[in-house]
Image (cartoon, rainbow, N blue to C red):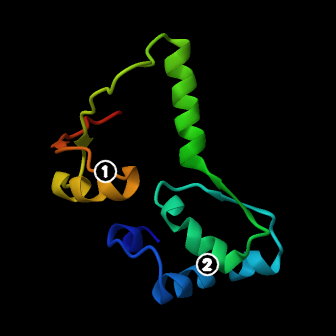
């Protein structure tokens, strides 16, 4: 699903075919809830609902994560309560790629990301 999302292919016959391949066995089991555990999966909510049916609940891990971050910022006194804050973006991959995709994930482009290399954690 990730390559489809990153190509901007979020709906249509190809997406439906791929989703049916992944979800048919779960639909047969009559699962009641699907957890969208990847950052890309919420982009496919409408298509997943179409394949699985309205009786299946979707849990968006991004919404849960955002709420947890908001709670932590509030608890630490770091939550901005007025005005618009600034965003600095960093990418470990190709920044141009990130810049293009940010519009899909955030509904607006976030500005130019700077490339960073992470040090060895060991």
Residue nearest the observer in this picture, 115 or 96: 96
Residue 10: x and y in percent read: 44, 73
Residue 101: x and y in percent read: 30, 58
Asked whether the residues under the numbered discs 2 and 1 touch, taking CB atoms below 8 Å apart as contact, a structural biologist would say no
Q: Which residue is mark 1?
A: 108
**Number of the label disc, if any, that sits on residue 75:** none
Q: Is residue 88 above or below residue 32?
A: above
Q: Picture quarter containing residue 63?
A: top right
Callout 2: helix, strand or loop?
helix
Asked whether the viewer can see residue 29, the reply is yes
Callout 1: helix, strand or loop?
loop
At a point 29% along the width and 36% down the height, the residue shown is 120
At a point 52% along the width and 27% down the height, the residue shown is 70
Q: Can you name the residue that lies furthest to the front here?
A: 83
At a point 24% along the width and 33% down the height, the residue shown is 88
At a point 23% along the width and 59% down the height, the residue shown is 100
Instruction: Name the quadrant of the C terminus.
Output: top left
Q: Which residue is mark 2?
A: 22
- Comparing marks 2 and 1, which lies closer to the viewer? 1
Q: Picture quarter containing residue 31?
A: bottom right
Q: Can you name the residue that lies furthest to the top here?
A: 77
Q: Is residue 18 above or below residue 82?
A: below
Dot 1, how many residues are within 10 Å of its Cα: few (below 14), some (14-19), or many (20+)? few
Dot 2, how many residues are within 10 Å of its Cα: few (below 14), some (14-19), or many (20+)? few
Query: Going by the image, does 18 lie left or right of 25?
Result: left
Residue 47: x and y in percent read: 57, 75
Numbered-mark total: 2
Residue nearest the observer in this picture, 90 or 67: 67
């Amino acid at each position: 699903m990730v390559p489809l999302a990153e190509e901007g292919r979020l709906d249509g016959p190809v997406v439906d075919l791929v989703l049916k391949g992944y979800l048919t066995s779960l639909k047969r089991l009559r699962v009641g809830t699907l957890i969208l555990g990847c950052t890309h999966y919420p982009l496919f909510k409408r298509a997943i609902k179409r394949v699985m049916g309205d009786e299946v609940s979707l849990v968006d891990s991004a919404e849960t994560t955002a709420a947890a971050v908001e709670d932590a910022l509030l608890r630490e006194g770091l939550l901005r309560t007025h005005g618009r804050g600034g965003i600095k973006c960093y990418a470990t991959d190709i920044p141009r790629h990130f810049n293009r995709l940010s519009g899909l994930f955030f509904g607006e482009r976030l500005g130019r990301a700077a490339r960073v290399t992470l040090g060895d954690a060991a």
